[in-house]
Image (cartoon, rainbow, N blue to C red):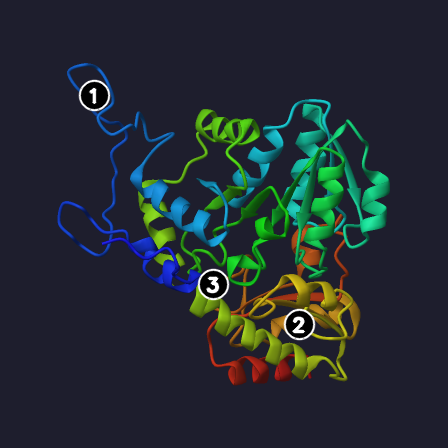
């Protein structure tokens, strides 16, 4: 039985678009571990699938759901968020000019500096919170891609997706948005003009800290999209069937998880905004946050489960505080059911641009009063 076209996104996620097993009518789709598919006597593919490096029913199901949630034309899932992001850049051609944010996920920044430039891309970092600066940095006829990350990791700065899309399209370029922090629960970049949406699906989409995955969704199935698909297939950066199955299972609870995490993050942000031992709270939901107006316009239903706080006392104060936490887990990553804390500057290393007093918080699904009390005793 197919779901009606008018269903809301939360219903589509909870029922995984209504996927069932056609042979048994099981409401949970099966895992398909096969690496290859049979041909008929006429040597034609019986299912249209050739080989699992390119096609597998377990890839197709989360791809279809993400395409629906992002209002796109097609989606490809990858073996990690990094492989998804790098596939977009590898689909470009040597010599192409690309604009990227000054505030960006540190591992991707390292790849852009250490590999993309050596491969021949001309990568330029610009303040993506200032459309005028982006407009001035565009090289007409040369800029092929503007890459956006909003809210950005780890300072939560917000960029105007609609304004960036207009700048990109006037220059004949594409706009790609890393929407990992926002998720399709809060933002649908394609509806705001973006051409591509990327997620580290390891985070909120899966939501259980047990799968490494990534995704890219496109507005149009054009030639550039074909190049991204080719990069994935030829590089072999696909998910295993079991990981894809787990990703689909995690996405069924996406809306309830993210809604609860967003409410808790807002509560924590408001509680510590004027705390005597906190220099600043970085969270788009606070009216005092510089990017709040843009966030309020392009994010709906909340502002996400990520926030950062700048602790009094610099790096020693920040490290001392996280060392005293009992409920929050000191660990890399974000978006899971457990609350995680990280001192980004020390994780990123000596070249980190992150303020040394910044502590990044990924709010989980614990009782928010327990999370607040734990932070209080650690900071105090």
Q: Against 355, is 74 above or below?
A: above
Instruction: Report the side of 289 relative to 32 (left or right).
Output: right
* Farthest-out residue, top: 42
- Vertical order, 220 against 29 (above or below): above
Q: CA distance from mark 3 to mark 1?
A: 41 Å
Quarter of the image for the C terminus: give it: bottom right
| In this rendering, position of residue 311 left or right of residue 32 | right
Residue at image position (44%, 58%) is 209
Residue 36 visible in the displayed image: yes
Label of residue 285 in the image: 2
Earlier residue among tags 2 and 3: 2
Q: Residues within 10 Å of mark 3 (few under 14, many from 20)?
A: many
Distance from disc 2 to disc 3, alpha carbons, whole Å, reads: 20 Å
Horizontal and vertical percent position of residue 95: 73, 23
Location of the N terminus (image quadrant): bottom left
Name, please, the residue furthest toward the left. 24
Residue sitting at 75 percent across and 81 percent down? 277
Please name whichever residue, 266 or 171, is drawn nearer the observer in this view of the structure: 171
Q: Residue at x 72, y 40 (%)?
A: 168
Would residue 193 be found to the left or right of residue 312 on screen? left
What residue does disc 3 label?
336
Q: Is residue 337 visible?
A: no
Residue matched to label 1: 39
Query: Which type of secondary structure does the marked residue at label 3 adopt?
Result: loop
Query: What is the CA distance from the residue labelled 2 to the residue labelled 1?
Result: 54 Å
Query: Could you tell which of marks 3 and 1 lies nearer the N-terminus?
Result: 1
Mark 2 is surrounded, within 10 Å at the Cα level, by few (under 14), some (14 to 19) or many (20 or more) other residues, namely: many
* Of pointers 2 and 1, the one earlier in the residue sequence: 1
């Amino acid at each position: 039985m197919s779901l009606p076209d008018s269903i809301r996104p939360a219903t589509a996620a909870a029922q995984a678009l209504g996927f069932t097993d056609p042979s048994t009518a099981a409401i949970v789709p099966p895992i398909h571990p096969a690496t290859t598919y049979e041909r008929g006597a006429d040597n034609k593919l019986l299912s249209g699938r050739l080989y699992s490096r390119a096609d597998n029913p377990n890839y197709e199901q989360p791809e279809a759901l993400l395409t629906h949630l992002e209002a796109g034309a097609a989606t490809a899932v990858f073996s990690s968020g990094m492989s998804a992001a790098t596939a977009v850049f590898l689909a470009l051609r040597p010599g192409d000019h690309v604009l990227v944010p000054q505030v960006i996920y540190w591992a991707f920044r390292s790849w852009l500096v250490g590999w993309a430039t050596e491969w021949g891309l001309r990568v330029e970092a610009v303040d993506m919170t200032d459309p005028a600066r982006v407009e001035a940095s565009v090289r007409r006829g040369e800029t092929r891609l503007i890459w956006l990350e909003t809210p950005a990791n780890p300072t939560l700065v917000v960029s105007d997706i609609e304004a960036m899309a207009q700048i990109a399209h006037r220059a004949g370029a594409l706009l790609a948005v890393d929407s990992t922090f926002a998720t399709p629960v809060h933002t649908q970049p394609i509806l705001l003009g973006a051409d591509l949406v990327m997620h580290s699906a390891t985070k909120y989409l899966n939501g259980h800290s047990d799968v490494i995955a990534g995704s890219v969704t496109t507005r149009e199935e054009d030639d550039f999209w074909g190049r991204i698909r080719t990069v994935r297939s030829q590089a072999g950066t696909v998910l295993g069937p079991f990981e894809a199955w787990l990703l689909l299972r995690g996405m069924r609870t996406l809306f309830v998880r993210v809604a609860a995490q967003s409410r808790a993050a807002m509560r924590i942000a408001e509680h510590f905004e004027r705390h005597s031992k906190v220099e600043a709270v970085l969270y788009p939901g606070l009216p005092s946050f510089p990017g709040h107006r843009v966030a309020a316009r392009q994010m709906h239903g909340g502002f996400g489960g990520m926030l950062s706080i700048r602790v009094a006392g610099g790096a020693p104060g920040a490290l001392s505080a996280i060392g005293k936490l009992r409920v929050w887990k000191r660990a890399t990553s974000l978006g899971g059911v457990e609350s995680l804390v990280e001192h980004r500057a020390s994780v990123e290393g000596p070249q980190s641009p992150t303020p040394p007093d910044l502590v990044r918080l990924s709010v989980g699904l614990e009782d928010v009063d327990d999370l607040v009390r734990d932070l209080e005793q650690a900071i105090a």
